[in-house]
Image: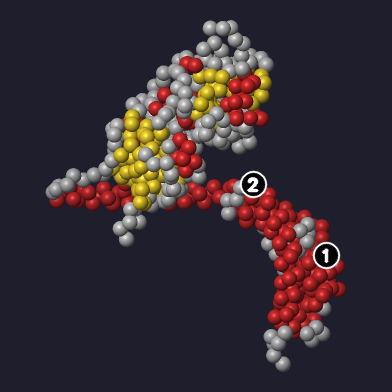
Amino acid sequence: MAVETYKAVFIRPGSGGWGKGIVVKPSGKRNKIVSVTGGGIHPVAQRIADLTGAQAVDGFRTGVPDEEIACAVIDCGGTARIGVYPRKKILTVDVYPGAPGGPLAQFITEDLFVSAVTPDDVLPYEGEVPKTEADGATSNFTHTYASSSASTSAPSATSAPQVPAGAGFLNRISGGFVGFGSVVGYIVNTLLASGRQAINLTITTILPFMAYVSLLLGIVLYTGIARDFGNVLKPLAGNPIGLVLIGAIVALPFLSPILGPGAAVAQIIGVLMGAEIALRVIPLQYALPTLFAIDGQVGCDFIPVGLALGEAKPETVAVGVPAVLFSRQITSPLAVILAWLASFGMYGK
Amino acid sequence: MESKRYIYKSRVLRVGPEVKELLDGGVAIFFADPVPEALEQVSIVHAQIEGQVDDINVGDAIYLNDSKAIITAVGERAMENIRQLGHMVVYLNGAEEATLPGAINASGKLELPKPGDHLTIIREN
């Protein structure tokens, strides 16, 4: 074999990835970067190969003996590939943000596995290469499934009992008990899962939302910005064009999230208009357009949270928030005009 | 309403030595041929018979010869795995939310297959 010198690379976890990062340095026979991914050699595998000088190989097309694998690049949804390579002590790079899970979870360790890796996360590396026991591949794999998969297959009772056909009375009774037990197991499992989900949602979405709204509300109340704003807008109330203007101003994309919490504008102008209408200074017809004019900002502080509660991805939130704010800018004055038109003849003579 | 449609049709080629243990633990891993040796250990290797694969829905049935499991959840990356690699991971725990992004959850019991067995996914309603 020709003398070849390979370079080392450090592969760090990508955003949302798992692990601390691993160092890959091909050597001697162990000189192939195996891409165990759908659709040919993955760019991450190619990048590792380019930087180290090793050869990238499509693992599904070309058979590579384990002892020739410098590292495996996988796009694993979380069960099989994520585990079988670390189990063989082969360095494993997942291009998806996988974390230890599934029946092989115990083999997925920080010294062997890193995830959510993009080509940019593969960096040249100078220095000591940590020793991995790459050749001690065998492991006491047996008897590990049962314990580790117990958590994933909790209501196994639903599939287990098979009462033999033609059994007697006693069997039918015990079959009844087993059936009852599996129903109870199913119910308990469902309730447990829903509880877990509820607490997760509370911690990851609802509590941060409450903190965010508290902060916003605190700022708005402390600075009095919304109250002052309501007072500034006061003179505009009382005529249709003024109301349309209020509708347009409160829905300005940079104002509406600040005016939303606390509803100060709605209170100040609402009270003013209500009093004026009660005194017959302003005709009753203005009630409906005013309602729409002073509420154009409602909910604008809540959009990111609402999207998050709907389990939107960060990209969706980034696009969705301005989209809703800008659409509000159009619909808010339009709603005032529609309400004004609808008010004609609404209250009779 | 007796309509039956094949979503997926394949035939088992080889069964890895660790498949039985995984099945006992409620997990079945499928890969289409060819498959790297490390994965073959844990996989039911099969040869897909038809090319086109429709989206699998909750309620469809997976048959491994005569044993059957009804799908209760399909992970967001599961279809991509099936189309590209013939790769499925079936968790036989009846969960209604996919255990992992690449997983398919189902309720029922799949028996240990042998080479030549049929692997099908059928929409029965």
Q: Could you tell me the amino acid type at mark 1?
A: Phe
Residue A33 on image: x %, y %: 54, 22
Residue at screen point 58% across, 26% down: A45
* A274 horizontally vs B24: left or right: right
Q: Give me the residue at 30% from left, 49% from top.
A: A181
Residue A226, relative to residue A208: is it above or below? below
Residue for badge 2: A314
Kindly identify which chain the residue marked by label 2 belongs to.
A
Q: Is residue A254 above or below residue B75?
A: below
Q: Which residue is mark 1?
A: A229
SS at circle 2: helix
Q: Chain of mark 1?
A: A
Q: Is residue A311 left or right of residue A347?
A: left
Give whichever of discs 2 and 1 has the lower sequence position: 1
**The residue positioned farthest toward the bottom in the image shown:** A349
Q: Quadrant of residue A151?
A: top left
**How many numbered discs?**
2
